[in-house]
Image (tube, rainbow, N blue to C red):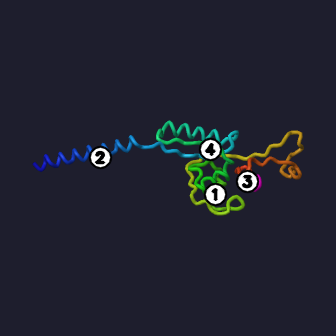
Amino acid sequence: MKKKLFVGVMILCLVVFFSAMRFDLAHAQRKYVSIASGWVVGVYFPLAGAISRIAHEKLTDIKITVESSGASVANAKLIASGDADMAILQNDIAFYALQGIKPMFDKPVPNIRGMTALYPEHCQIHARKDAKIASVRDLKGKRVAVGPLGSGTEQNTIQ
């Protein structure tokens, strides 16, 4: 008798357990996550779009929304304020944010965590052939495009 009672209680527990799991799964809501990228015409925006598409193929319960932004420095500030869940940043800018290094950051951004390296990012200096610029010294007095406001490229140029 005890054995039949035990088996009956176990079956009842399993039925309740699996019913509860099924209820949770049926009522689970899709989670929305934002990723701050960069300018629409830059590299970060389409890269974030690709990450979003691949993630959605594998994780159907998560929808990643790609947000256009001012790139690395702006993205670190969006993470700090909670306005973005994820962001693409240059590794040096992420370090400056974590440390609170001025003038980019007034205080440390302690909630930044690295997830993965995406690609090596190089900043290069180019000049028109007819500009008569052969070295960095020749830039004195010239107009120089330093990258979008708030971008890591802008900060690297200033440095």
Calculate the distance from the C-alpha at mark 2 to the C-alpha at mark 3.
55 Å
Residue 156 on the magenta segment: yes
SS assignment at label 3:
helix
- Decide: marks 1, 2 in contact (CB < 8 A)? no
Which quarter shows the C terminus?
bottom right
Give me the C-alpha separation between circle 2 and circle 4.
40 Å
CA separation in Å, label 4 and label 1: 22 Å
Distance, label 1 to label 2, CA atoms, is 46 Å
Place of residue 46 in the rendered image (x, y in percent of width and height, measured from the top left):
63, 38
Q: Amino acid at mark 4?
A: Glu
Q: Tell me the SS state at disc 1.
A: helix
Identify the secondary structure beneath mark 2.
helix
Residue at numbered disc 2: 17
**In which quarter of the view is residue 11 placed?**
top left
Q: Is residue 153 above or below residue 60?
A: below
Which residue occupies the foreground of this view, 115 or 74?
Answer: 74
- Please state if 56 lies on the left or on the right of 125 as rendered: left
Residue at x-position 78% and y-position 49%: 146
Magenta part of the chain: 155-159
Labels 4 & 1 near each other (Cβ < 8 A):
no
Looking at the image, tell me whether mark 4 or mark 1 is earlier in sequence order: 4
Which one is earlier in the sequence, the residue at label 2 or at label 3?
2
Q: Residues within 10 Å of mark 4 (few under 14, many from 20)?
A: some
Say which residue label 4 marks: 67
**Mark 2, other Cα within 10 Å: few <14 / some 14–19 / many ≥20:** few
Pair 4/3: label in front: 4
Q: Which residue is mark 1?
A: 95
Q: Earlier in the sequence, mark 4 or mark 3?
A: 4
Q: Nearer the viewer, mark 4 or mark 1?
A: 4
Q: Earlier in the sequence, mark 2 or mark 4?
A: 2
